[in-house]
Image: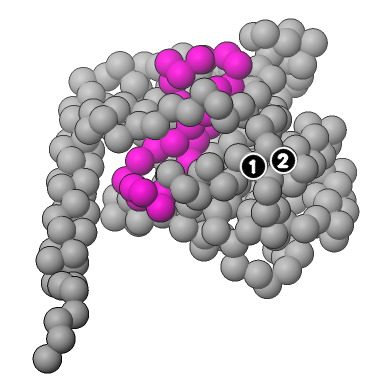
Amino acid sequence: MVVSSDKTCRMVVLVATRNRVESLRRLVRSVESTAAEPGGVGMVLGIDRDDQESMRTAQDLARSATSRIRIVPLEPSGEFNLARMSNTLYAASEEPIVGCFGDDVVFRTQGWDLAVWQEFQEDQSVLLFGDDLLQKGRLATHFFTHRRVHDAFGYYMNEKFRRIYIDTWWDQIYRSQKKIRYRPDLVFEHLHPSLNPEREDELFRKNARWEAADQQTWESEENQRDLRRASGRFRWLVWKTKWRKIIRAAGSPAKKDH
């Protein structure tokens, strides 16, 4: 693991990548150039051990970055399991606010980090996402959540799914309690091959093979039952957090003169 500094950051962006050097460089530079306080933003990059070009690029970026960049070597696998890799990156991070992003995203909004920080100062039980210029708020494909929620659940990403539906899982759970926050003023552009066919590469084509299996898992009765249980658990967590705030406020009366 490579660390650019020992500074504790307020938020972290998790990204798994393979054989996409230019995309990786573009993402990291966009995060740094648009953050109002780049020193308060961390990035954890997951890179396969055999992807030497990406590893060298990430190391170069870490050496010159203002942000704290950590590189987590991953064991290469024929199955690019994004959920499992995301959980590994989550375990390697410590920041309270956690961002799930892909290497095909470009941060466009200046000062996005201050807006994200303010949202979570007001409510830690929200899922915050911006305009990816693709879904237009219909689905939170890339988002920020608070570590307390995931630690309470015991996982970051649901490993029943390899790639697609890992975002849908949390989107549905947070929406069930009206705890999803869409900020169209925060633009995190998703350069998806569906709109940019020239960006389709071997990794994208390889991953597409798993989509049918993930869809079948999502539509299964077992998954829908698990989703309802998870939503109920989240409802209890939101309720518990709300009442803790009320109790803390009630236990801190204004000082009286004696």
Q: Residue at x 15, y 58 (%)?
A: 246
Which label number is shown at residue 34?
Answer: 2
Q: Residue at x 70, y 53 (%)?
A: 38
Image side of residue 161 versus residue 69, left or right = left
Q: Residues within 10 Å of mark 1 (few under 14, many from 20)?
A: some
Q: Residue at x 35, y 32 (%)?
A: 180
Q: Any magenta on residue 128?
A: yes
Q: Say what amino acid the circle numbered 2 marks.
A: Thr
Q: What residue did someone put label 1 on?
A: 111
Confirm or deny contact between disc 2 and disc 1 (CB under 8 A).
yes
Of 179 and 230, the residue lying toward us:
179
Rendering colour mode:
one colour
Q: Say what amino acid the circle numbered 1 marks.
A: Gly
N-terminal of the pair, mark 2 or mark 1, is 2
Instruction: Report which quarter residue 188 is drawn in.
Output: top right
Of 229 and 175, the residue lying toward us:
175
Q: Residue furthest front?
A: 257
| Secondary structure of the residue carrying numbered label 2 | helix
Q: Any magenta on residue 113?
A: no
The spot of residue 247 in percent (x, y) is 13, 64
Which label number is shown at residue 162?
Answer: none
Image side of residue 241 versus residue 58, left or right = left
Q: CA distance from mark 2 to mark 1?
A: 6 Å
Q: Residues within 10 Å of mark 2 (few under 14, many from 20)?
A: some
- In the image, residue 111 sits, relative to residue 202, either above or below, namely below
- In the image, residue 247 sits, relative to residue 201, either above or below, namely below
Does residue 165 appear in this view? no
User: What's the magenta region?
Assistant: 120-145
Q: Where's the C terminus, which quadrant? A: bottom left
The spot of residue 211 in percent (x, y) is 50, 18
Of 203 and 243, the residue lying toward us:
243
